Image (tube, rainbow, N blue to C red):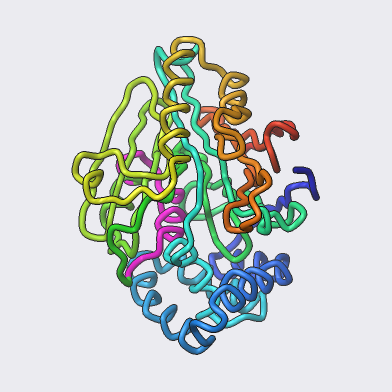
Amino acid sequence: MKGKSLFTMELSGEPYDRGHRYGEACKKLIARMIEEQFYQEFSGRLTKDQMLKHARKYEPFIQNYSPEIAEELKGMADGSGRSYDEIVMVNALEEREAFSQCTAFAATGRATKDGETYVGQSWDGMESEWWDGELGLLFKVRRKNGPDTLNYTNPGILSCAGLNSKGVSINWNTVPRLEMTTGVPTYIIVAEILRQKTLGDALDAALRADRAGCFNFVISDDTELYAVEATPNDVDMFYSGEYMGHANHFVSDKFRPKQKIEYSSSIIRHNRINRLLKENCGEIDLQTCMSFFRDHVNYPHSICCHPGDDPDPRQRWLTLGSWVGIPSKRELWIAHGSPCENEFVRFSL
């Protein structure tokens, strides 16, 4: 799938000012996100007032967790001409009932050809969410009081994934909703992790949040790899000095027996990415990592995902983007659209 080039922009200044510039630049896209992903999606089930009333429940949790992020969201609201409640609603996108499909990995140490650390993921969505390539955004953020960040994201959301100038990176997966509550939305935790100076601080950012939902985070720096599986009330962590791959289900013994897996795709992609990592262990480099994302085993519901010919639009999934990060070099190599049809382009801090 090809479309418009990846939107890129640099932001700097105080948190409110950064958010305001984001909101101004992406005003139409943010409006489309709100209208299509929420008001149209829930039409006939929830009114706008009901949705915004629910969004307001997250606001004190965000303010308490990160006043800086709250200020950015307020700036984005003013810049885009939308209400603060609507911007918070968009940043709670992961806490909707919808489910996404992504495949994440990380490799380091003796697993890689040069001892470098490589991380990355596919970013999948329904075919209707491609928006001719306009859904994906990349922001380079210059911060006065903390690391600069390179954020891959969607309109109205501060950060979906990325890395920072201290080498901290985050990639992640949706997992079954074992629990849901009001609290800090997952995308807000992602944004806060990218503002941390050390790996320990990044892990703590996931632990200290009053989490609203469930997730798996792959958090790394120049040498260390951690997976964090979490629900609102519990967490489990995994460490590897070589490699790890993860799809859209829990693998922890703590959570695995409680989940209901509705699609085989996650199992296949999880096993496939780990097989590719194992078979290439010791020889993994940038090009090898890129090739992982072009894998078509179990097509169309493969790591490189395609809509296929399913008549149900809810089953027509597409890889909207993929990337490989090199934390030590502060680089993201991004394929905008299907990685089997688009080249990976380098972006850096």
**Would residue 168 be counted in the magenta stretch?**
no
Q: Which residues are magenta?
A: 183-201
Q: In the rendered view, would you say 303 is above or below 138?
A: above
Q: From the viewer's side, name the closer residue of 304 and 17.
A: 304
Q: In the rendered view, would you say 347 is above or below 235?
A: above
Q: Is residue 217 left or right of residue 301?
A: left
Pick out the residue farthest to the front.
Answer: 311
Classify the position of the C terminus by image quarter. Answer: top right
Q: From the viewer's side, name the closer residue of 264 and 86.
A: 264
Write the residue at 64% across / 76% down.
35
What is the number of callouts on the image? 0
Q: From the viewer's side, name the closer residue of 207 and 313.
A: 313
Q: From the viewer's side, name the closer residue of 58 and 250.
A: 250
> Percent x, y for residue 81?
66, 80
**Would residue 196 be counted in the magenta stretch?**
yes
> Percent x, y for residue 82?
62, 80
Q: Is residue 59 left or right of residue 333?
A: left
> Percent x, y for residue 2?
78, 43
Write the residue at 58% across / 19% down.
288
Classify the position of the N terminus by image quarter. Answer: top right
Write the residue at 45% across / 10% down.
282
Q: In the rendered view, would you say 288 is above or below 50?
A: above
The part of the image, by quadrant, that contains residue 153 is bottom right
The part of the image, by quadrant, that contains residue 33 is bottom right
Write the residue at 21% across / 53% down.
234
